Image (spheres, rainbow, N blue to C red):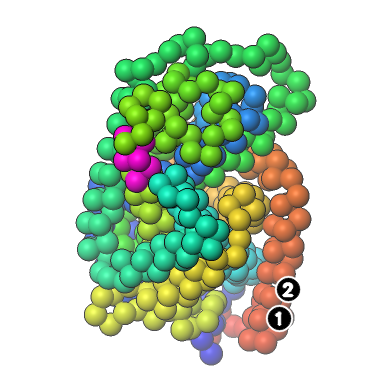
Amino acid sequence: MTPSQKTASATGANTESISAPVHATQQDPGLVRGLGLKEAVALNMIDMIGIGPFVVSPLVIRAMGGPQALLAWTAGAVLALLDGFVWSELGAALPRAGGSYVFLREAYGPQKWGRLMSFLFVWQTLIQAPLVIASGAIGFSQYATYLHAFTAYQQKAISGAVVLLLVALLYRRITTIGKISVLLWIGVIGTMIWLIGGGITHFNASLAFSFPPGAFHLSHLFFAGLGAAMVSTTYTYWGYYNICHLGGELREPEKNIPRGIFISIVGIAVLYLAMQTSILGVVPWQQAQNSPFLVSTFVETISGPFAARVATMLVLWIAFASIFAALLGYSRVPYAAALDGSFFSIFSRVHPQKKFPHVSLLFLGAVAFVSSLLFRLSTVIAAILATRLLVQFIGQAIGLILLHRRWPPERFPFKMWLYPLPAILTMCGWAALFWATGSARKWGLLLIGLGILAFLLRAREVRQWPFAATEARHEPEGA
């Protein structure tokens, strides 16, 4: 019998209705609370500002058909803020390693539906987390071709080498990683400020706001374009929740998780909008929508080829920093599930000296390495969105409402404004975005279907819910 099964037997039938509180001071075994607010904001922001805003900017302008593309960046920020309330409530109330795994398990009940939802999250994490890492590495190698005309095979070699370097850097203590994250964050913010400053000094308002005729005609085509553009902009905002996966390694998580989330979202939204406006004020949108190296073209226009090469290297720094933070956060998810007895026990192993889940890190790094060699960036982005929206994002918003029905108010150190309106609007926004992913929807649904099948096969093998429901119902409380 696994530790989780023993716990289930000990708690009895009452566990389903009211699960035991998870206090902010509770430790995940073997992990150290070595991160503060500064590191939390740094890890969030470097996760958010990856290669995404630099490679998807032309796609967003093309989808919207002009400078009104700024609406897609604004809408992405609003949706992130609304969802930030959901993550803040859950993260402050359940500050444990694994983030969404813990949230879904507790929200839907750890002995029944919570088992399925948390399993589905781990299942999709094993697929989409390496895709997130691979997308950053692929974008890195593609953008590097501005510096040198690498062949397709050379690009693949670069993307694979990036993943291997990431694993090597993350194979160390969390306190050291916190210092590395702050250093990477300084480079990220410095680059953004430099780009924005250059745009301000060369800004042409008539160029930036040269809207084509009918730009704001609210037709079906307008909203279809907005949906397609938001698929790209939302991808660039994701990462504001990264510290929730590191909840077991954060000091004062009931305060620092909400603060870190909202500081990150607002800060990144301001930087994105300023950067996109600056670019449109220098590079005509008709040219920008077809530029594969838009930021480099922008810098070359205002400062010449040498500055453009420097800017390209800084963009690569940002891309590397982002996937560094993403791999760090995701490596805690299989660890948390294995620690709970709901996944393969080998993933619960913590490095005896460095105190981090090294097996989980190495596994995700290996799958990301293979993915970076096999897939294309556009395919990866759509697949990431489709696989995550239903279970993780919509599932968490519904789960938070369920927790509010079961838990007293004092169980929530942070409380969202105008509850439950932000959670409801979040669900509507994610549902619309899921529909906008187009053909990728079927892959998301297929992944969920396969996950349910895998869950049922495992549950039947280990005699857990729903196959052990009858026995559990007759088991005396406290047995």
Marks 2/1: CA distance?
6 Å
Residue nearer the viewer, 129 or 202: 202
As drawn, the label of residue 318 is none
Left or right: 38 in relation to 331: left
Q: Residue at x 54, y 70 (%)?
A: 370
Q: Residue at x 58, y 30 (%)?
A: 289
Locate residue 141, reporting x and y percent.
47, 54
Residue assigned mark 2:
453
Q: Residue at x 71, y 24 (%)?
A: 222
As drawn, the label of residue 457 is 1
Locate residue 342, reporting x and y percent.
54, 76
Q: Residue at x 31, y 66 (%)?
A: 169
Q: Secondary structure at mark 1?
A: helix
Up the image or down, 124 lies above or below 434; here it is below
Label 1 crowd bin: few (<14), some (14–19), many (20+), radius 10 Å:
few
Residue nearer the viewer, 159 or 22: 159
Label 2 crowd bin: few (<14), some (14–19), many (20+), radius 10 Å:
few
In the rendered image, which quarter is residue 61 located in? top right
Marks 2 & 1, CB-CB < 8 Å contact: yes
Q: Secondary structure at mark 2?
A: helix
Residue 32 shown in magenta: no
Locate residue 251, reporting x and y percent.
26, 56
Q: Is residue 95 visible?
A: no
Residue 309 shown in magenta: yes
In the rendered image, which quarter is residue 196 located in? top left
Say which amino acid is labelled 1.
Leu
Left or right: 63 in relation to 324: right
Q: Write the start and end of the magenta stretch as one range.
A: 307-313
Locate residue 119, reporting x and y percent.
60, 69
Predominant SS of the magenta segment = helix
Up the image or down, 471 lies above or below 403; here it is below
